Image: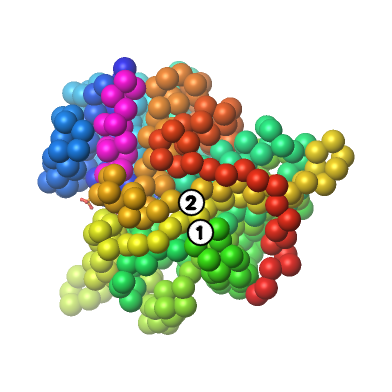
Amino acid sequence: MKRVLIIGAGGVGRVVAHKCAQNEDVFSDIWLASRTKSKCDQIASEITEKTGRTIQTAAVDADNVPELVALIKQIQPFMIINVALPYQDLTIMDACLETGVHYLDTANYEPLDEAKFEYSWQWAYRDRFEKAGLMALLGSGFDPGVTNVFCAHMQKHHFDTLDYVDILDCNGGDHGYAFATNFNPEINIREVTSNGRYFENGEWIETRPMQYKKQFDFDQVGPKNMYLLYHEEMESLSVNLRGVKRMRFWMTFGDAYLKHLEVFRNIGLDSIEPIMFEGREIVPIQFLKALLPDPASLGPRTVGKTNIGVIVKGTKDGKPLSRYVYNICDHQECYKETNAQAVSYTTGVPAMIGAMMMCQGHWMKAGVYNMEEFDPDPFMAALNEHGLPWSDIETDIDVDSLPE
Ligand code: NDP
């Protein structure tokens, strides 16, 4: 029976709040705080309607440590579930240290003016969390998050060495807009327009954006083009997986999406460098975000499924083996349950489960950790129970031989 404070009331925050409310035996008291309190109140009223439970709400600027500290002291939660933006990770971690509260997030810290996708800033908090007897769980969404746990599951149950790891992220959803992003547009566009990178023989190999493409027939979605990107879970997995020789991350994009991105890129609308416009400074990508549909509004109109998983080729008892573990999630089913589409759902459910692991003590030790550093079994069981069931099969799929 624990009190939690969720920070961030976007698509993911909505799902986390709904899922925590469904699990009253673990989350006996729920607070939802964000910059705009009316968004928290809206989510709170939906939850009362669906579950009969009351959750409490507050306004907070999570860039401001003293403001966070005051709120945390007032609420006294067991832990914070940070589902605001990656820019707020360090201020919230600072506030947790100051108030003696555990921490969880779903995305690595990003400075506003750099797109780096790396854990260095947050790993630098290890000593401080350890000394304070507090835990910080990093990247408890789907990818990062479930993909790390899928790898840990493969490592624990199937493989002696995980030689070749391919993470495949497919969103087969259709929202009917010419262009929209399924989560925060600024983060999404920064991720997709950055150079790609993959891990091979102990080194990171850099690629141009969208340089490598493969066609893959995703179960229950159908054939899609997927492109090699860098994705943040590979940083910790490259350290924590046994014997990994190569690791890549692939994400599907439709042609229309890529055409829009190319145009934004060509005219500088995706830039994170501030420019002067009519006497005031604006950041082009933030201006673009203001023009695009709010990801939270895509829920009712998105149909289709997501399919995200990991294919591992490796060895067991000296013999070669290939396995595929994946989850399929239906956008409309997610919307019926939580008023959010599957990209928010597949992030929010693992955030709730990560918090559940900490609240129940399955995963609890002082320090800063990535997901694969814990026993995957209770988390994998909870995925099946709380809306993200998975399949774990032997496979003869060879990503290298897929058509380009
Ligand atoms: P949204 O943009 O929909 O929501 C972000 C929320 O954070 C909004 O409610 C926003 O408030 C609030 N917020 C922003 N800045 C502050 C601040 N300074 N103080 C307090 N609240 C603030 O994003 P999503 O819900 O789509 O994503 C949430 C997080 O999940 C992001 O970090 C994203 O990177 C991560 N993510 C992780 C994934 C994974 O698989 N691991 C996948 C998808 C997302 P306001 O409404 O006032 O703007």
Element on which disc 2 rests:
strand
Q: Nearer the viewer, residue 167 or 76?
A: 167
Q: Where residue 350 sits in the image (x, y, percent)?
A: 43, 39
Q: Position of residue 162 (x, y in %)?
A: 73, 44
Image side of residue 304 versus residue 238, left or right: left
Image quadrant where residue 195 sits: bottom right
Instruction: Look at the numbered disc 2 and say if its residue's Cβ is closer than 8 Å to ligand 1.
Output: no
Measured Cα–Cα span from mark 1 to mark 2: 8 Å
Q: Which amino acid is tagged 1?
A: Gln
- For label 1, the residue is 220
Q: Which residues are magenta?
A: 13-27
Instruction: Report the predominant secondary structure element of the magenta stretch.
Output: helix
- Tell whether position 109 is magenta: no
Residue 391 position, x and y percent, is: 57, 44
Residue 30 percent across, percent down from the top left:
24, 28
Q: Quadrant of the C terminus?
A: bottom right
CB within 8 Å, label 1 to label 2: yes
The secondary structure type at the circle numbered 1 is loop
Looking at the picture, which amino acid does disc 2 mark? Ile
Reply above or below: 366 against 220: above
Residue 286 visible within the image: no
* Residue located 43% across and 58% down the image: 305
Residue 398 in sight: yes
Relative to 187, is 91 above or below?
A: above
How many badges with numbers are in the image?
2
Camera-nearest label, 1 or 2? 1
What quarter of the picture does the N terminus occupy?
top left
Badge 2 is on which residue? Answer: 328
Sequence-first disc among 1 and 2: 1
